[in-house]
Amino acid sequence: MGYSDEIIEVKGARVHNLKNIDVNIPREKLVVITGLSGSGKSSLAFDTIYAEGQRRYIETFSAYARQFLGGLERPDVDKIDGLSPVIAIEQKTTSKSPRSTVGTITEIYDFLRLLYARASDAYSYNTGKKMVSYSDEQIRDLIIKDYKDKRINILAPVVRARKGHYRELFEQIAKQGFVKVRTDGEIVDITKGMKLDRYKTHDIEIVIDRIQVGDTEQDIKRLDEAIRTAMYHGNDITMVVAHGDKEGRFFSRSLMCPETGISYPEPEPNNFSFNSPKGACPTCNGIGTLYKVNEEKIIPDPSLSISKGGLAPYPDNKKNWIFKQLELIAKKFDFKLTDPIEKLPKEAVQMILYGGNESLEVNSKTLGVSRKYKIDFEGLANFIEATYNNNDSAGLQRWAKGFMDKVTCPTCEGTRLRKESLYFRVNEKSIADLANMDIALLVGWFDDLESSLSRKQKQIATELLKEIKERLQFLLDVGLDYLSLNRSAKTLSGGEAQRIRLATQIGSQLVGVLYILDEPSIGLHQRDNEKLINSLESLRDTGNSVIVVEHDKDMIERADHVIDIGPRAGKYGGSIISQGSPKDILKHDTLTAQYLSGTKEIEIPKTRRKGTGEKLVLKGCTGNNLKNISVDFPLGKMIVVTGVSGSGKSTLINETLYPILNAHFFNGVKVPMPYKSIKGLEHIDKVIDINQSPIGRTPRSNPATYTKTFDEIRSLFAKTPEAQIRGYKPGRFSFNVAGGRCETCKGGGLRVIEMNFLPDVYVNCETCNGKRFNRETLEIRYKGKSISDVLEMTINEATDFFESIPKIYRKLKTIKDVGLGYITLGQQSTTLSGGEAQRIKLATELSKRDTGNTFYILDEPTTGLHFEDIRVLMDVLNKLVDKGNTVLIIEHNMDVIKIADHLIDIGPEGGRGGGEVVAKGTPEQVSKHKTSHTARFLKKEL
């Protein structure tokens, strides 16, 4: 092996804020890149190494194929040597489709489908008996054995239990040369113009032959011929009736119930797929749930009349078509629109909901004549359902959804598959039973399976079982034993999704690949961290290189090589301040080293806050895996909710508590998970949820526009004497509207040059040179700076610059306080990391005047934060609580847990083993708890 085979050599990386750095990364090792948030870790790992690996891969395609892929820009780096194929496992790569499940992402479900198609037994859904299928020879031998020396009729079933007169069918049968048929158990001759009673259900079989069963060669030949003909006309089913018998016996080439004659097609893997029309339940199309109109939502209060707004979809009685129809229904059933709905006749309410088609005559008393009216009304419930099912407008669909409930599909009971697919079983279990088991249970079931398979099944299934067991084991190894294969991908947290992809990658057993992971420990309890690190080490040991962007102390200590980027963040970062083994890192005097060695740490507060004495009491939560729990949230404290992954923290806070509060204060639309009651809402006056979703999805959004600081800055520029002389308004200084912006690049500052085969190239706009505004706008200056210069300032510089303008200063100061002094005011939102976006949101909320009774909810705010960033963030949150607000954090990070005033530990395990409150109280009280997993790790910290 040459030198370059052992390292990945990066020369002159200048992406984002990287300062032209050179770095050698050892191959086939576990390498951790760490450093402050915004120091350039992701820029090195993802935007340089991964982007270049991707680009080289795409360059192997023909120019023709490349034009469809869209090009990838070459990262700003002089050269990278020793790069192998790269796979990035990021957090944001889950699909939001309701059809994507844990089973389909990990491909375990595909193996299960194959297992069921090849090695399962079919059972009849009528009698529950095992289905049988025969070859033609077996059928002949059975007939000779069971009907020897008897007279039999060999029949081909053509109609089974269906209505109709079947005149054409009889004509067709006669044309094919048959003379007799058996209809409803009677054998009759076919006559011209023969037909049956149209409104009764019939069974019709063609009489193929009438034979005396013998075993001479002649007899056997005739029997074979008859069976073959019967199979051809009877769609692979033959019926045999002995002379004088009423009941016949069915024989089939495909799977068939020997008693009732129903048959299944030969099973194929897509008969078990809920994404294929062959396997999906026809009612819900394989999604497992439906939206169904709820009558109580249409008529929420039956004591109101229609004219008082008793019909919720139609509250204001506009004189439109619906109103006319309602008036006619009122005439027909003789009531007034001012009568309470509960007093109306049942038939009238049915007609209002489900419509009707009737005409009625009304006698006019004054004129003495009668007029005809026609009621042609589809009904409110039907109208709502139709609107929901076929509407292109999201708004109308949302309106219709408001009157509907999400219910489990009544046909497949949430299994997503058609009835026939559920009656194929392996060891008494259908494929849907397996998909609903926790992975831990499923592993046990597969371990016991081999003893109960027949020899033939074993031969078929050996390889399949090996694959399935291996993949399940990888899911256990990354700490996901509480998920089931049926779990929808969109309900997974970022960390779970990332670990599932990790398990899939370990399962693919590739060698010589470079894996880049972005904080895989997010959302992982300390207990499962060990499993995760072992999984990464096993990836490395099979001969892969693993690069992890991570802040987790355990992960850094277990790494083979650590690269620390800094010294600060943003334009003050982007250099490599130390690298080497974890022991070497400690010798340098960097922030990372100080926290690792313990010279710096996040202080545990001397006393815990007493709070305001009031509390929120949430009772009887039963969503997902919560076991009917009741929780108290003491106000005026910092509350931290902990527990292993999958224990029910997000269900309790994000799915139950937040939607209740949001609906109470801001009429939010999201429906909370089921709960019994909540008390104490009067003690808080608003709720704010700060999550990690991006603050803007376009390059035109930036911290200045998001925090609304830019509005104030534009007003300030419009008030300068020069601007007033020229008559400029604040809109003149916006780069999103025509007037003041540069029209060549429409205020974007960049121009895209489209190259057909090559990647698009972004260049500074030649007219404004990237300044976004036209010359006249840039001539307006405040303290010598133009509006474009202001957007280029970092928050730290801008805070000093605008010190004398309180409105702007207050907003900028809060951004600086949350540790984001290094970003520029005009930095594109798309280039901010998740942790940075979250802190900008936090800053925006902090800059509003707080009332002292606000309830803040943060879900894992430490994602993407270095120890030092966590300290800064916690200082900000502590200030909030000191003013009397309540801050609730869902968190696994011990540095946050140990400084909480009140802990709520949910568990004890994930999935079915969770959903209970294990311990609550101050960190000191919780750490004494015997069965809590959090307590074990908390003891070490305290």
Image: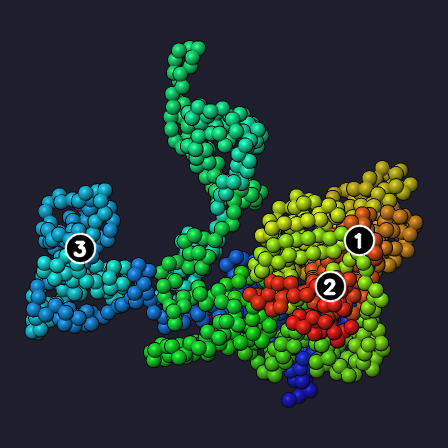
User: Residue at label 3?
Assistant: 205
Q: Nearer the viewer, residue 650 or 704?
A: 650
Question: Badge 3: few (under 14), some or many (20 or more) residues near its Cα, within 10 Å?
Answer: many
Residue, disc 2? 921
Q: Is residue 375 above or below residue 609?
A: above
Mark 2 or mark 3, whichever is nearer to me: 2
Please say whether residue 5 is visible from this viewpoint: yes
| Rendered residue at 36%/63% (across/down) | 423
Q: Which residue is mark 1?
A: 612
Q: Position of residue 499 (x, y in %)?
A: 60, 70
Q: Earlier in the sequence, mark 1 or mark 3?
A: 3
Q: Secondary structure at mark 1?
A: loop
Where 471 sits versus 711, above or below? Answer: below
Q: Quadrant of residue 54?
A: bottom right
Amino acid, disc 3: Glu
Give the side of residue 146 with respect to residue 99, left or right. Answer: left
